[in-house]
Amino acid sequence: MMEQKYLIALEGGGTRSQAALMDFDGRVLEILEGGDVNTNFTSYEQAQRNIRGVVAQVLENAAVAGPSVDLFVSALVGPRFGEETFGSLCPNARFIYYRERDVIFARAGIYRPHGIGLVAATGATAFGVRADDGREAFVGGWGALLGDEGSAYAMGLLGLRAAARAYEGRLGCPTRLVEALCQRLQLDPAHFRQDLVLTAYHKPLSRADIAGLASLVTHLADEGDPAATRICEKVANDLAGLGLHAARQLFQPAETFDVVVAGGLINAGERVLAPLRSQMAREFPNAVLTIGDQPPAAALGRLAIEKNKPG
């Protein structure tokens, strides 16, 4: 009997990494999340420890020996990690690298992309590609200091700033943001200014912490909070603008192409997606909007299986 062979798929960015152990039929045997890998926000050494740790844990949890891993595929925002990092864990593995763009489309089961892949996560990025002539577009992805409009980080930050203005009575509309932030961050309402400043600057709040506040903002918007609703509308329109700008660089209005959206911010549903859906339909009526809902590491593994089929 032939020994069972496996693949490991590793995906990651500035907030977290994800590793999946899979068989070559595309079944996920174990999947885990680890620390971030983007060396714009963490050191090379820490990123290396993060991903080596999550891969080792996946193998241990599944009770699979590393030498049984035949293929190791990765798509990481930042440096490539291969045999120098995982050779002792997976000594028989062949290493293949993919791009973040490939993972976005693969999350919707698209392995030969022709369209726009839109990331709506801690950050916001749009990737465009034409399958016929190979032209590409890349928009956004500037990070928290320089951009990330249309992201969960942007929504969380706008929520924090609106709460600060509301506390001083200069927001111009009613909101429950102060109350909600006190509950989420365990702040004393009587000392909101001091507590929020201390939390923001001395704790401090990380990019992931701030992005995590997006769910608070969207929840308030769903309850009719005027300030939260305005924030959601701005972020959703920024995201739509990102996708449209990428599409305009590659496609004519009458063309048919895919628009795949993936990332944690899409958990807000139509509150975030509706502007993209309506604006894309108005300018590119034949574009097909799809949600990329497969786990990123699993999608990457299935992409690798598809691309490496015999013959």
Image (cartoon, rainbow, N blue to C red):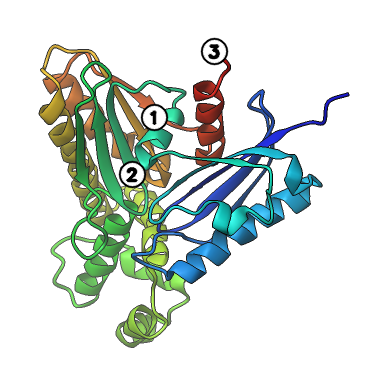
Q: Which amino acid does label 3 sit on?
A: Gly
User: CA gap, disc 1 to disc 3?
Assistant: 23 Å
Residue 311: which numbered mark, if any?
Answer: 3
Q: In front: mark 1 or mark 3?
A: 3
Query: Which residue does the numbered mark 2 point to in the structure image?
Result: 120
* Labels 2 and 3: the sequence-earlier one: 2
Image quadrant in which the N terminus is located: top right
Q: Which amino acid does label 2 sit on?
A: Ala
Residue 45: which numbered mark, if any?
Answer: none
Q: Residue at x 40, y 43 (%)?
A: 263
Q: Which residue is drawn at 32% across and 64% down?
A: 177
- Can residue 34 be seen by looking at this rendering? no
Image quadrant in which you'd find residue 67:
top right
Q: Where is residue 260 in the image (x, y as percent from the top left)?
A: 34, 29
Query: Which residue does the numbered mark 1 point to in the structure image?
Result: 105
Image quadrant in which the C terminus is located: top right
* Labels 2 and 1: the sequence-earlier one: 1
Q: What residue type is labelled 1?
A: Phe
User: CA gap, disc 2 to disc 1?
Assistant: 13 Å
User: CA gap, disc 2 to disc 3?
Assistant: 36 Å
Secondary structure state at the residue bearing disc 3: loop
Q: Position of residue 14 (x, y in %)?
A: 40, 58
Q: Nearer the viewer, residue 285 or 115?
A: 115
Q: Where is residue 264 in the image (x, y as percent from the top left)?
A: 42, 46
Q: In front: mark 2 or mark 1?
A: 1
Indicate left or right for 140 with 191 as reference.
left
Image quadrant in which you'd find residue 180:
bottom left
Q: Tag 2: Cα neighbours inside 10 Å, few (<14), some, or many (≥20)? A: many
Q: Tag 3: Cα neighbours inside 10 Å, few (<14), some, or many (≥20)? A: few
